[in-house]
Image (cartoon, coloured by chain):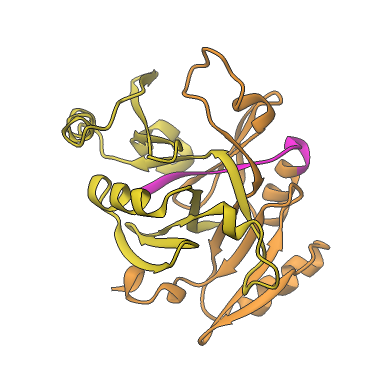
Chain colours: A yellow, B orange
């Protein structure tokens, strides 16, 4: 299957929106007050929800969901762009939490304002699973 | 940005692996005991983690993450395939929790064995954000 929507849960939609649009380049698609922000990426949507609301909805339009604790999403960069993205994070005062080499592939880890664990990596990381 | 890895948290990796491979057609890429299962989809990875382990790792190889509560992922189907996928779920004894029409677009909601909220929808749902 192809994933159309990936979700993260955040406690502050304002901070998250600012971060994902200005640092990561997502486009704001829509927002519903303090419930959610929907962001458009390249070939897929990133949906940010406030779990204090979505996990407790009664008779909502869609089934209830909402998680607490750090989630994880990895964003695809191209081979050779690692240093550029590392500098990009530093330019935005985003702390690089860790850099990990998986064989020849470098993953760069950082956090969003809500504490979710984010990663930059190339699809080469996944070998034949995604590159045949 | 393009999303390379989408994550969900599950309490039972065996049940989740069976569900995501047999019902949703993901390919098993790798598994680490009771910590995680990595699945390959179409153009991206779906990573399933046991948060009881990943949220509590000390000096792990990668930064700590792990959430509790229902997450949400939407899988892309093509226009006209809605009935086929609905029947597919029924054939696998997966309960359809809700069907929601967003304008002319039908979303089909169901759950994985861990209680995560899953959805089938077409990318037309997102209009020009993904279809220009």
| Residue B123: image location, x then y, percent | 45, 71
* Location of residue A131 (image quadrant): top left
Q: Considering depth in this image, is A127 or A55 the residue closer to the camera?
A: A55
Residue B84 lies left or right of residue A92; in this view the side is right
Seen in the picture, residue A3 relative to A72 is either above or below; the reply is below
Residue drawn 34% across and 35% down?
Answer: A120
- Residue B1 in sight from this viewpoint: no
Image location (x, y in percent) of residue B99 = 67, 77
Q: Residue at x 52, y 25 (%)?
A: B64
Q: Position of residue A21 (x, y in %)?
A: 27, 53
| Residue A84 image position (x, y, % from top left) | 17, 33
- Is A100 left, or right, of B12 in this rendering? left
Give the image quarter of residue A47: bottom left
The residue sitting at the bottom extreme is: B104
Q: Is residue B99 left or right of residue B103?
A: right
Which residue extends farthest right? Answer: B93
Question: Could you say which is closer to the camera, residue B43 or residue B99?
Answer: B99
Residue at 50% across, 53% down: A7
Residue at x 37% of width, y 49% of height: A16
Viewport quadrant of the N terminus of chain A: bottom right
Q: Nearer the viewer, residue B85 or A6?
A: A6
Residue A112 part of the magenta-drawn span = no
- Residues drawn in magenta: B1-15
In the displayed image of the protein, which residue is found farthest to the top? Answer: B59
Quadrant where the image shows the C terminus of chain A: top left
Relative vertical location of residue A126 with respect to residue B108 in this rendering, above or below: above
The answer to whether residue A122 is above or below residue A96 is: below
B11 in magenta: yes
């Amino acid at each position: 299957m192809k994933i159309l929507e990936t979700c993260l849960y955040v406690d502050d939609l304002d901070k998250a929106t600012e971060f994902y649009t200005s640092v990561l380049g997502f486009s704001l698609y829509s927002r519903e007050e303090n419930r959610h922000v929907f962001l458009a990426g390249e070939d897929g949507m990133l949906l940010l929800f406030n779990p204090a609301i979505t996990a407790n909805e009664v008779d909502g339009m869609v089934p209830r969901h909402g998680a607490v604790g750090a989630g994880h999403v990895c964003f695809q960069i191209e081979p050779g762009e690692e240093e550029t993205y590392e500098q990009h994070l530093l330019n935005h005062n985003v702390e690089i939490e860790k850099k990990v080499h998986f064989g020849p592939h470098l993953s760069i880890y950082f956090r969003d304002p809500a504490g979710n664990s984010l990663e930059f990596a190339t699809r080469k990381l996944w070998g034949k699973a995604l590159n045949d």
